[in-house]
Image (spheres, helix red, strand yellow):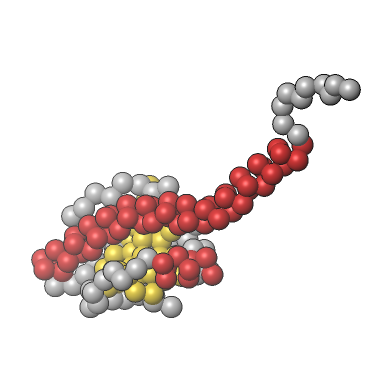
Amino acid sequence: MKFPSSKGFTLIEVMIVIMIIVIITAVFMPQYEKAIEKTKVSEALLVTRAIADANRMYNLKNGSYSANIDDLDIQVTGKDSFLANPRKESRLFSYAAQGQGAPNSIAVANRLPVSTFYTLIIYNDRNGVGCIYYSDRGKKFCQSLGEDYFVVN
């Protein structure tokens, strides 16, 4: 008795391959998302440090720090937005010269949507960059940034 030759994969083989792909995706997806977010932070940090430097220059000229980003000698791209202080909004971050409720801050970057994830903040009296979190996801992310950052909450 001859069996007909089988060309192709059985259902079990296809299901095993799909399960392997799902497991690999589940393992690596959180690391991929964290790497993408860190890339976004590095871009925001460049802008935030430039705002802090411009605010320090403003302080040298005027004797005090500005809470208004428009007073600084810097061009930050983005649309104008007004929450507590004038700010510029890009697609991912909202930038300001001073944070609401943070009088010693000289540059702030809020991850949009505001107050749902985290804020990067530079103080005039503290070294490094602060990371304020507003959710468990934000807390995990702030803690994963490394030694150059300090968690504020």
Which of the image's four quarters has the C terminus? bottom left
Q: Residue furthest left?
A: 61
Q: Percent position (x, y) of residue 113?
A: 49, 57
With respect to residue 134, does 113 lie above or below?
above
Left or right, 75 with respect to 151, comes to left
With respect to residue 71, does 3 lie above or below?
above
Which of the image's four quarters has the N terminus? top right
Left or right, 110 with respect to 24, comes to left
Report how many numbered discs are placed on residues in the image: 0
Task: Give the quadrant of residue 10.
Answer: top right
Q: Percent position (x, y) of residue 124?
A: 23, 74
With respect to residue 40, does 131 lie above or below?
below
Q: Residue furthest right?
A: 1
User: Residue 38 or 52: which is nearer the viewer?
Assistant: 38
Residue visible at 18% across and 55% down? 73
Residue visible at 34% across and 74% down? 150
User: Residue 74 or 123: which is nearer the viewer?
Assistant: 123
With respect to residue 84, does 89 lie above or below?
above
Residue 89 visible in the displayed image? no
Task: Give the quadrant of residue 8.
Answer: top right
Left or right, 7 with respect to 122, comes to right
Q: Percent position (x, y) of residue 43?
A: 32, 52
Residue visible at 61% across and 52% down? 23
Task: Give the quadrant of residue 125.
Answer: bottom left
User: Residue 122 or 138: which is nearer the viewer?
Assistant: 138
Residue visible at 31% across and 76% down? 103
User: Residue 65 or 113: which is nearer the viewer?
Assistant: 113
Residue 38 visible in the displayed image? yes
